[in-house]
Amino acid sequence: MNAVTEIAQAVQVYNIYIRATPEQIWDAITKPEFTEQYFHGVRIEVRDGKRSSHLRDLAWEEAVLEADPPRRLVHGWVSYYDGDLAAEPSSRVTWEIEPQDGGYTRLTVVHDELEDSPKTASSVAGTGWMGVLSSLKSFLETGEGLF
Amino acid sequence: MTTMTAQTTQVYQVFIKATPEAIWEAITSPDFTAQYFYGARVEANATRRISKMGDITGEDPVFEFDPPRRLVHGWHSEWDEDLAKEEPSRVTWDVVPQDGGYSLLTVTHDQLEGAPKTAEAVSGGWMLVISGLKTLLETGKPMAGA
């Protein structure tokens, strides 16, 4: 049972359906004026091969491994906002954006390469990522994020 | 191994800007469910959960009915002949209020060991259902539509 839990946490998959276009979702995940409204106040900018984050007096950068707007974004992940987590190796986050019939879009987040980052894996798991995705959906559909 | 385990106990979560009472009404009242649950009119009370879709009616036992926090009921996929033959499974809805005016909804679909086709079928469907539920409660309109 523990083994299964660990395997599940090293590759985490989340999805949500949002009444928005792929372009709107792309902008919401790559532009700081949007991310700060739903991503725990973090200003995130994806540009020139980097994903730059600012939270109060903290600033950090991750490599963008793939950027195919408005469908697919792959970047490194380090939880700089927490000392314990920041010491763990970098993991990887993939955003996939797929339009559906009916005027809505499926957003899938895969957080993987977490084998050597157990504290990060546990911190982002479950309500961690689902909180961000729920808040993003609220932001795009109502104009206000949850947190 | 991991995949099999994931499929016999499936957990889906979403945060919704709504009270537990509003969420409870949306999951137990047919006028709400018709707008986000593949068009199914679902009504749940302390003993039974009745689901009507077109001319198909499915009925499952309710095991726990604790408004507005927890609903546990049986599940069998009446709408598909192959799935309907499988053993019944179980669905639990947990609604927990959070600080900040929103609630966490967790749907756990388990006891799927005797229903592999159902497990496969619902794994792509639950997030669509609870995404639609969230949209309906936060905007007053269904998610799908022109």
Image (cartoon, helix red, strand yellow):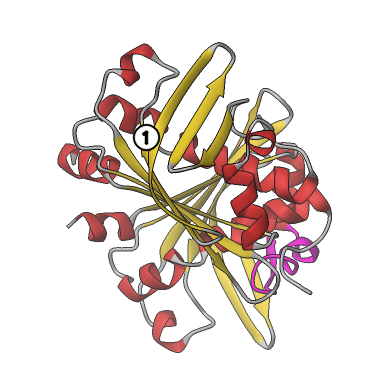
Chain letter for mark 1: A
Q: Which residue is depicted at the point 36% across and 72% down?
A: B87
In the image, is residue B135 above or below residue A2?
Answer: below
Residue B19, percent from left and from top: 75, 37
Q: Which residue is depicted at the point 80% across and 65% down?
A: B31
Residue assigned mark 1: A77
Quadrant showing the C terminus of chain B: bottom right
Quadrant of the rendered image containing residue A64: top left
Question: What secondary structure is marked by label 1?
Answer: strand
Quadrant of the rendered image containing residue A133: top right
Residue A110, percent from left and from top: 38, 50
Residue that extends furthest to the right in the rendered view of this protein: B140
Left or right side of A109 for B117: left
Type of amino acid under label 1: Trp
In the image, is residue A1 part of the stretch drawn in magenta? no
Along the viewing direction, whichever of A114 and A51 lies nearer the viewer? A51
In the image, is residue A27 above or below residue A35?
Answer: below
Q: Which residue is depicted at the point 76% across and 73% down?
A: B145
Q: Which residue is depicted at the point 37% across and 34% down?
A: A77
Residue A1, percent from left and from top: 18, 41
In the image, is residue B50 above or below residue B9?
Answer: below
State the extent of the magenta-drawn residues as a range: B29-45
In the image, is residue B33 part of the stretch drawn in magenta? yes
Residue B48 appearing in the image: no
Quadrant showing the N terminus of chain B: bottom left
Crowding at label 1, few (<14), some or many (≥20) Cα neighbours within 10 Å? Answer: many
Along the viewing direction, whichever of B22 and B141 lies nearer the viewer? B141
Residue that extends furthest to the front in the rendered view of this protein: A48
Quadrant of the rendered image containing residue A131: top right
How many numbered marks does the figure carry? 1
Residue A119 appearing in the image: yes
Residue B125, percent from left and from top: 51, 66
